[in-house]
Image (spheres, grey):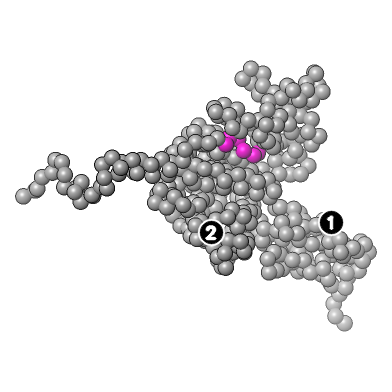
Amino acid sequence: MALMITDECINCDVCEPECPNDAISQGDEIYVIDTAKCTECVGHYDESQCVAVCPVDCIVADPNHAESQEQLHDKFLRLTATPA
Amino acid sequence: MNDMATLTKKDFESNQDVRWCPGCGDYAVLAQIQKLMPQLGIPRENFAFISGIGCSSRFPYYMETYGMHSIHGRAPAIASGLKLARPELSVWVVTGDGDALAIGGNHFIHAMRRNIGLKIILLNNRIYGLTKGQYSPTSELGKKTKTTPHGSIDRPFSPVAVALGAGATFVARTVDSDLAHMAGVLRRAAEHEGTAFVEIFQNCIVFNDGAYDAITDKSVRDDNRLLLEHGKPLLFGKERNRGIRLRGLEPEAVTLGEDGVTVADLVVHDEAADHSGLAFFLSQFDAPKLPVPLGVFRAVNAPAYEGMNNQLHADAEARRGRGDLAALFNSGDTWTIA
């Protein structure tokens, strides 16, 4: 499933540059993850880069966007496909 | 907008871009304090944040309150003056291990002993971050930094022990990555009358990353930290089956069930004890031998300095009438230089 940032976020900006999918941006209150772009780093890394760097562990799986490893991999392929 | 009932965290966020490094523990402290402010029932215009110099001292810029980014190590002195002149204000000092304990050590000690109504928040990252990585008074023995390339031979001291030694009435410690714990400790500090001192273990991601891994890494932290709770036995560990026992004056970590040890053998935390003996004991604990205590070490009631100062003035005025500064200057042994 895609990841989400909880309201424990402290706006420290450490996650945004780590995201290989450019899925993270600053929202109105806290940083947010674009579900359509988040592959949990599948296709890029073995572990989710934002989760690894978050100093307060506020990035968790988004229960409203459950996706299998295959679906995440498909998303990765879609996102990285070169337009024909 | 200034109606207290409707104040929110947002009302305490200034329009300044926060300029700490991405991932800095300071963000966590800022967020918790901004969250706490609207819960205290104090009008926003009655808050003041005073700082000295260092990364942590950028704090007042980011608070939508009154404040002053003052001189290195002297924030407690300036804040003391403010509190005496305007005792109704909630005055906060945000400082760091260099600012409070090196250049500001003297002011720090006297703020602690006076019991003046300041909330002193010390962000301890065990390094000079703003000046790019020199050792500080809390850097570990043997630590290699830019100014100690062969390892530091300066023995670090514990800010909690210094505060207790100076007679502080409220002394607590928390850690940047445990938001719920930090919120609880900061609230206790805010509600304390007199000097409230909080040390926050704060990770400097650039110049001293991982300084507190032993007590923040989820896989090991429960075995290395001791969460203090008033009136409760000193228990720790993932299974909460380890505890602290005193053998004479020697504290030791024991395991429940081993050698017949039971909870009844453990020290019971008493933050309100008249003396600071137990709190001082706890301030000496360090991992891995003994778990690092987090929470309130000491919280006792004592008259606050600003109240005593006001009383002193009122009594003197009642006895001798209102003073006249010009008359005082021209009284007694004065002479004219021809």
Residue located at (62% from left, 50% from top) = B204
Q: Is residue B90 among the parts visible in the rendering?
A: yes
Determine the chain carrying the residue at label 1: A
For mark 2, give the secondary structure: loop
Q: What's the magenta region?
A: B294-299
Percent of width and height locating residue B47: 51, 56
> Looking at the image, which residue sits at the far left?
B338
Q: Label 2 sits on what residue type? A: Pro
Seen from the viewer's position, the closer of residues B103 and B161 is B161
Number of numbered discs visible in the structure rendering: 2
Seen from the viewer's position, the closer of residues A2 and B133 is A2
- The verdict on residue B155 being magenta is no
Seen from the viewer's position, the closer of residues B105 and B36 is B36
Q: Label 1 sits on what residue type? A: Asp
Give left or right: position of B121 versus A70: left
Vertically, is B11 above or below B235?
below
Quarter of the view holding residue B229: top right
Q: Is residue B127 among the parts visible in the rendering?
A: no
Give the residue pinned by disc 1. Answer: A46
Percent of width and height locating residue B207: 60, 50
Q: For the N terminus of chain B, which image quadrant?
A: bottom right
Give the residue pinned by disc 2. Answer: B43
For mark 1, give the secondary structure: loop
